[in-house]
Image (cartoon, helix red, strand yellow):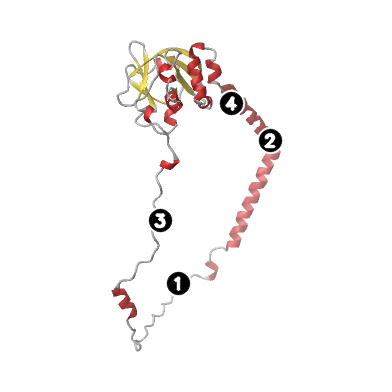
Amino acid sequence: MSTSRILISAVLLLSSVAVATAFDITKLLDKYPEYTQFNNLLTKTKIADEINSRKTITVLAINNNHIGEIAGKSEDVQKRILSSHVVLDYYDTQKLKQLKTDTKTQLTTLFQASGTAGDQQGFLNVINQKDGIVVFGSAAKDAPVDAKMESSILSQPFNISVLSISKPIVAPGIENLKPVSSSSAPKAAPAPSKTTPAASPEKEKAASAPTPADAPATKAPAPAPKADAPAADQSPPSSAAGKQMVSGVSVGLIVAFASFLAAH
């Protein structure tokens, strides 16, 4: 098989794998009418596009009965809150039940990846309690960890898992964040002045002092002859000979590589 055919086959294989692992969160949630409002908010804020661009993701969904706390907020705040319900890793019920009991495990969310989160607002804490209940909450200081996992809506190991939780997770201060703008970026410090400093009066006097005309010139001593100078036939090989050797090696490598391609 030629080299070009091998490359084409590899590209086709990678393309088929990418298609097989792709998912659309909007179409997946369309099958569950009790999450219509949550699904609509994902589309409205374009969080759905960011979810679909990922290969491994976990979505903490809220049903229509509990979405009201988010629905009345501005679109910018909705986007922050919803992005903190998207975990950048795969967690299904089985994996959550395997976590160490009564111990906080920190999860990274899509909100953390946005670059606007602060004070641990972009992280979640999850606790696998001894009573078998799994709870989620913001990792921000003094935030409650009381959003219970109710059920698994769907899972496609190990690409996407959608879990239902009992209430929205709203990190403290997430509604008061200001969007980052280029005008608020710190300005560069001005370049230092290149003005030459004025000479001191002492240096000016020294420069203008007359040099004695009859001062005898000092001659440098003649260099002593070097002993044991190397003979002419002991000099290193010329650069032309070195280039000839490198050229020979390069030609040999090219011929060998051409022979390999012809054989395959």
Residue 27 visible: yes
> For the residues carrying marks 4 and 2, which lies nearer the camera in this image?
4
Distance between mark 2 and mark 1 Cα atoms? 63 Å
On residue 4, the disc is 2
> Number of labelled discs?
4
Q: Amino acid at mark 2?
A: Ser
- From the image, tell me which residue sits under label 1: 228
- From the image, tell me which residue sits under label 3: 191
The secondary element bearing badge 1 is classed as: loop
Residue visible at 70% across and 38% down in the picture: 263
Q: Nearer the viewer, residue 52 or 71?
A: 71
Distance between mark 3 and mark 4 Cα atoms? 50 Å
> For the residues carrying marks 3 and 2, which lies nearer the camera in this image?
3
> Which badge, 3 or 1, comes first in the chain's sequence?
3
Residue 158 visible: no
Say few, some or many: other residues with alpha carbon within 10 Å of mark 3 (under 14 / 14 to 19 / 20 or more). Answer: few
Above or below, comparing residue 237 to residue 125 in the picture? below
- From the image, tell me which residue sits under label 4: 18
> Which badge, 3 or 2, comes first in the chain's sequence?
2
Distance between mark 4 and mark 2 Cα atoms? 21 Å
The secondary element bearing badge 2 is classed as: helix
Residue visible at 66% across and 30% down in the picture: 9
Kindly indicate whether the residue at mark 2 contacts the one at mark 3 (C-beta within 8 angstroms).
no
Distance between mark 3 and mark 2 Cα atoms? 54 Å
Q: Nearer the viewer, residue 86 or 89?
A: 86
Q: Nearer the viewer, residue 251 or 82?
A: 82
Quadrant position of residue 110: top left
Say few, some or many: other residues with alpha carbon within 10 Å of mark 4 (under 14 / 14 to 19 / 20 or more). Answer: few
> Which badge, 4 or 1, comes first in the chain's sequence?
4
Q: Quarter holding the N terminus?
A: top right
